[in-house]
Amino acid sequence: MNRRCVLILPFAAGAVLHDSGRAQKRKPDAESALLIGTVFRDPGFAFPGVQVLLEPAPDGKTSAKVKVKKMKAVSDIRGEFSFRVPAAAMRYTLKFQAEGFIPETKEVVVSGPDRQDIYVTLKPAKGGI
C-alpha cells in the first residue's frame, strides 16, 4: 500500500510543475488589449455576417516598437467579433459593413492591456432590407 503512495506522489508533483509552467506562458497576453463587440440590427436583433475592419486611426500615433496592421473579422451567429491588439496607446477606427445597411464607423482608444466592449446598431439603407 505504501509503495503505491510513493509512486503516485512524483506524478502529482510533476502535474503541479506543469501547471506553473502554463501560468508563465500566459504573461505575454498581458501585453495585449482585447476589442470585443456585438453588432445589432433594428429592432435590436444580433446581426451575423457583418464585415468589421479595424485599422489605425489616420492621426493615430504609435511607437516604433509597435507594428499595427489592418485586421478584418466577420460577426458570428450572435453578432459578436473580437480583435487582439498591442496594449500600447493607440487610436483605432472600426468600420462595419453589411449589404443593404448603412455603414457605421466607431473610434476606439487603447491605453493599456484592457478589454473594450463595443456595441453598434446598423440601420437599413433606403430601399434595403
Image: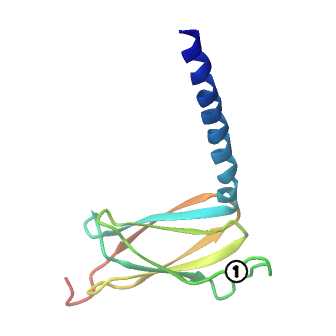
Task: Please name the residue shown 39% across and 85% down the image.
Answer: 103
Q: From the top left corner, tell me how far across and down residue 49 is, in percent.
A: 31, 76
Question: x%, y% of residue 112?
Answer: 70, 62
The number of callouts visible is 1
Residue under the point 64% across and 88% down? 58
Q: Residue 87, located in which quarter of the rendered image? A: bottom right
| Residue 31 located left or right of residue 106 | right
Q: Is residue 5 left or right of residue 86?
A: left
Q: Residue furthest right?
A: 64
Residue bearing the label numbered 1: 67
Q: Nearer the viewer, residue 21 or 14?
A: 14
Q: How is the image coloured?
A: rainbow
| Res. 90 image quadrant | bottom right
Q: Position of residue 1 (x, y in %)?
A: 53, 9
Q: Amino acid at mark 1?
A: Lys
Whether 82 is drawn above or below 69: the answer is above
Residue occupying image coordinates x 80% and y 81%: 64
